[in-house]
Image (cartoon, grey):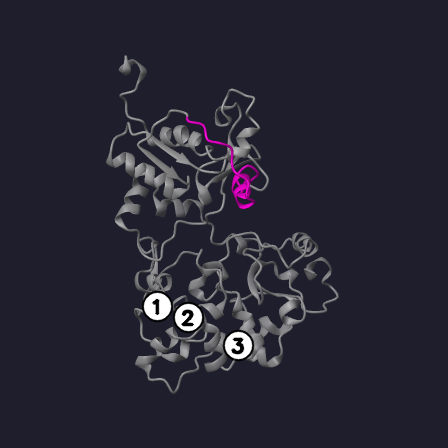
Amino acid sequence: MKDDLGESRQIPRRDFLQGALVAAATTLSGSLLKAYASDPVEAQNAAGYYPPALTGLRGSHPGSFEEAHALRDGRKPDAPTDTGEAYDLVVVGGGISGLSAAHFFRKLTSASSRILILDNHDDFGGHARRNEFQLGGRLHLLNGGTLEIDSPRPYAPVPKELLAELGIDVPALSRKIEHPNFYESLGMHLGVFFDRETFGADALVSGYHKVPVRSLLAGSPLSPRARADIERIEEGAIDFMPGVPPDARKLQLSKISYASYLRDYVKADPAAIAFYQSWPHGEWGVGIDAISALDAWGFGMRGFKGLGLAPGIIRRMGYTPSGYAATGGSDVDRCAGADHGRGPRACSWRRPRARGLQRFSDPLRVGASAGRADAQRKTEVHLQGRAPARGAFGLAVHPRLQRGPGDPRAGGARLG
């Protein structure tokens, strides 16, 4: 009888994910499921239930946070109901880690293991959920948050094996979906936006790494001294640590922030320091006052060319920059090369950090008001990255949108 019902057959991983996990992923969405209370059909089994096709704000959507807010506000949740179900494993969290834990458990035990995965969202995947859109009669798949599966070091055996089991060929996938020259094909170049809160006026300049720094900053609100300081940081080869022995420089850099290095050793103008302040936001979520100068060097940030630092890392270097500097990261098998003599560096276009830039991934809201965000949309500027707390930041911008402070042509391109 059991064989007739198929209970003894192996359950493919795809069925496991699309069946049991979809049901489990909604278990904690109490408030969301209350809307379906009068319907005997569970929400995830209702006709048309398919979260990847939903639109709108799809982060912590309504139904994913009400129970937590109730606990915060001192209200007790509804009494639980004993369903009489029994499981071999209960995993809290339906993101990539939770799904992997369930996969590994079943792999190490039995395909018949009963596993319940709990999540407070209506779809599994966590930050790596997927979004689907129908455009021009074609299905387009987009990431719902996670940008890449990049690692500072080559994949360890366990994740490497998991990728193989999932049928993910990282090099082939990279070649298929990456378009490193996309913005350039639209006539766009890397630019820098100066916000008025920090620099006294809004200004947008284009051509970073395409034109000399002096030309780039000609349309900025920076003082002549700040421009000169950025120019020598970007293009100079000055030894800013003449009093520190060469073999002690890395250790000294590990004890000070990049902001301190620019201030105390480079003697840079405060506005020049503010120019770099937000650059690590895309990687660490903090400014240059919170990362060591050694880690900044490891990421290829500017101002170290004249120090004569030998290739290699030291123990006081952070995990991420030391990983890229020592191994080239998880992309090293696909593409590696030398980076200013500091060892292997994967050539993935997704990591402009190796050239001293912030890595950007998310749509940027310019400034602090919706009006400024609307201006951003009108200019058709493709901005990648979150607005920094202060300082300049990089973005892809069409040259015709370059505007300096007080430019009468600014109009919608004034961004504020």
Comes first in the chain, label 3 or label 1: 3
Q: Is residue 382 visible?
A: yes
Where does the magenta region start and end? 60-82
* Residue plotted at (53% across, 65% down): 278
Secondary structure character of the magenta stretch overall? loop
> Counting other residues with Cα less than 10 Å from the Cα at mark 2, is it few (<14), some (14-19), or many (20 or more)?
many
> Counting other residues with Cα less than 10 Å from the Cα at mark 1, is it few (<14), some (14-19), or many (20 or more)?
many
The amino acid pointed to by label 3 is Glu
Residue 398 falls inside the magenta stretch: no
Q: Calculate the distance from the C-alpha at mark 3 to the C-alpha at mark 2.
A: 22 Å
Which quadrant of the rendered structure holds the N terminus?
Answer: top left
For label 2, the SS is: loop
Q: Calculate the distance from the C-alpha at mark 1 to the C-alpha at mark 2.
A: 8 Å
* Number of numbered discs visible in the structure rendering: 3
Residue 143 vs residue 149: left or right? right
> Counting other residues with Cα less than 10 Å from the Cα at mark 3, is it few (<14), some (14-19), or many (20 or more)?
some
Residue at which label 1 appears: 317
Residue at which label 2 appears: 292
Residue 40 vs residue 243: left or right? right
The amino acid pointed to by label 2 is Ser
Residue at which label 3 appears: 231
